[in-house]
Image (tube, helix red, strand yellow):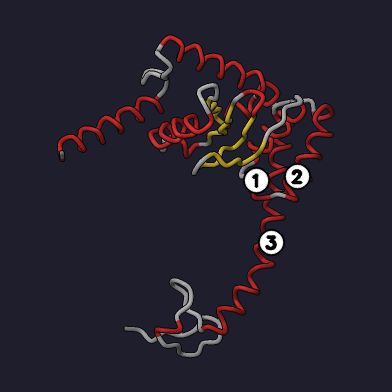
Amino acid sequence: MLKQICWKCGNPISPDEFQGQTRRYCEKCYDEYTEEYKPVISQYVVIKTRVMFERAMRIMERAKADMTKYKRYANAIMKHSRDNPELYRSADEMIAAVVMLAEGYDFEMNHSVGRYRVDMYIPELHVCLEVDGQQHKHNAAQDGKRDVEIRSKLGKEWEVVRIPVKYIEEQPEKLPEAIIAMYNNIRAIRAKNNGILPETYSRREKMYYEQNTMQYTRKTHII
């Protein structure tokens, strides 16, 4: 076994002094390291948020959005994101915030619902908006389960509306009407299917039903 040394001071350390996971620090150096790293993280968060906002504005410009119309609201979101960087996780979420704010909607970003957090919580519309990036293609079954649990927490009048980033980036100004249209479409489908979304509604529902069917089969087989 290789002799363990502290990554900061280079002195040998005993196993009971190990701090951290792979990199090893003696107790004194680990405390110093964490204190030194705190301002680095703070600076990174500020820069990341500013870059994210700039990317959001450039996306809206490419989509030929009326930037004069959105100036006031974009500045408000920039300030809010600077004061609350943990609430904004992507440029596309910032775009959604700017557009929905301009349309007069009250909302909460990165809102907690049970054990989950939704990108945008919009009480007036009874909608939890999820801005879906590429990673959601690989999490369809999990997203389906998540949506069911979120709706069970909020009530039957609520829906989780998922809009791919592609459509937000292509037509940001159409976001409010797209949310309302999708909400109404989901409600109409539920009305025809005893309150549920059938597996034919989307790939997400299909995979969610398939996964739950397999889990039920395994459980009954064990019993």
Q: Are marks 1 and 2 in contact (CB under 8 Å)?
A: yes
Quadrant of res 181: top right
Q: Residue furthest top?
A: 192
Badge 2: residue crowd in 10 Å (few <14, some 14–19, many ≥20): few
Tag 1 residue: 87
Q: Is residue 123 left or right of residue 218?
A: right
Please state which amino acid type lies under the numbered disc 2.
Answer: His
Question: Is 206 above or below relative to 107?
Answer: above
Spatial CA span between label 2 and label 3: 16 Å
- Compare residues 223 and 218 and report the one nearer the observer: 223
Of the numbered discs 1 and 2, the one sitting upstream in the chain is 2
Query: Which residue is located at x 45 percent, y 90 percent?
Result: 12
Please state which amino acid type lies under the numbered disc 3.
Answer: Ser
Badge 3: residue crowd in 10 Å (few <14, some 14–19, many ≥20): few
Of the numbered discs 2 and 3, the one sitting upstream in the chain is 3
Quadrant (top left/top right/bottom left/bottom right) for the C terminus: top left
Quadrant (top left/top right/bottom left/bottom right) for the N terminus: bottom left
Query: Which residue is located at x 67 percent, y 26 percent?
Result: 172
Q: Is residue 155 left or right of residue 222?
A: right
Tag 3 residue: 42
Residue 7 horizontal/vertical position (percent): 51, 80
